[in-house]
Image (cartoon, rainbow, N blue to C red):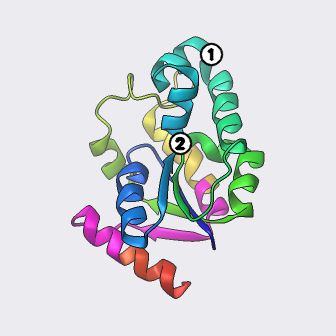
């Protein structure tokens, strides 16, 4: 295992836990959503508005395929699992960790769905998105990490233990 790749729903803590995990494990940190924003000079929601969901997914796939890092914790966008090519690229040099959270917690955490930059199709609800993506995350993951209640720091401590033990 070289890179640690975090996947999961928007609001699952990929960016927050990713920074803490990188710090705890002495690794670099990359957030692919930030890479997309910097490369395209716009926030995610503006890119979704401009290019639509399909165009946005292409931007996301391209950003991931261009990623060439080692010894890094990678926080991905929630929609990365729609791209088999992106997932294969991430898997070549990393372990895929699915950050599991129940729907109710995702719903509680996401207050700004219309401005957050979530790749929702016309008429799709957050619940519909959740139900669609969960099987994709589960099948892509090498490790599924059901996040405990409590602080982000305690979650990272447990995740570090799992990753170090190879479970």
Q: Which residues are magenta?
A: 137-157
Q: Is residue 89 above or below residue 54?
A: below
Image x and y of residue 75, in percent: 50, 51
Q: Is residue 152 magenta?
A: yes
Of marks 1 and 2, which one's residue comes earlier in the chain?
1
Q: Is residue 105 above or below residue 4?
A: above
Left/right of residue 65 with respect to residue 98 in the rendered view? right
Residue sitting at x 28%, y 33%: 111
Q: Residue furthest left?
A: 150
Q: How many marks?
A: 2
Residue sitting at x 66%, y 61%: 139
Q: Nearer the viewer, residue 52 or 161?
A: 161
Real-space Cα distance between discs 1 and 2?
16 Å
Q: Which residue is mark 1?
A: 51
Residue sitting at x 50%, y 78%: 163
Dot 2 crowding, Cα within 10 Å, few <14, some 14–19, many 20+? many
Q: Quadrant of residue 157?
A: bottom left
Left/right of residue 10 with respect to residue 77 in the rendered view? left
**Can residue 120 be seen at all in this image of the molecule?**
no
Q: Nearer the viewer, residue 70 or 76?
A: 70
Q: Which residue is mark 2?
A: 77
Image x and y of residue 63, in percent: 65, 37
Quadrant in which the C terminus appears: bottom right
Secondary structure state at the residue bearing disc 1: helix
Dot 1 crowding, Cα within 10 Å, few <14, some 14–19, many 20+? some
Secondary structure state at the residue bearing disc 2: loop
């Amino acid at each position: 295992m070289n890179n640690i790749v975090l996947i999961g729903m928007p609001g699952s803590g990929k960016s927050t836990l990713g920074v803490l995990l990188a710090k705890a494990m002495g690794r670099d940190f990359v957030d692919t959503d930030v890479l997309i924003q910097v490369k395209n000079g716009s926030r995610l929601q503006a890119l979704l508005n401009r290019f639509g969901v399909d165009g946005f997914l292409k931007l996301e796939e391209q950003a991931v395929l261009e990623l060439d890092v080692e010894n890094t914790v990678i926080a991905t966008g929630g929609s990365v699992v729609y791209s088999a090519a992106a997932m294969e690229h991430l898997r070549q040099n990393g372990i895929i960790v699915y950050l599991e959270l129940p729907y109710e917690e995702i719903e509680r955490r996401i207050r700004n769905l219309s401005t957050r930059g979530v790749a929702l199709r016309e008429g799709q609800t957050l619940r519909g998105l959740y139900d669609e993506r969960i099987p994709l995350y589960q099948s892509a993951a090498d490790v599924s990490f059901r996040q405990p209640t409590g602080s982000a720091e305690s979650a990272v401590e447990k995740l570090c233990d799992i990753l170090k033990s190879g479970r």
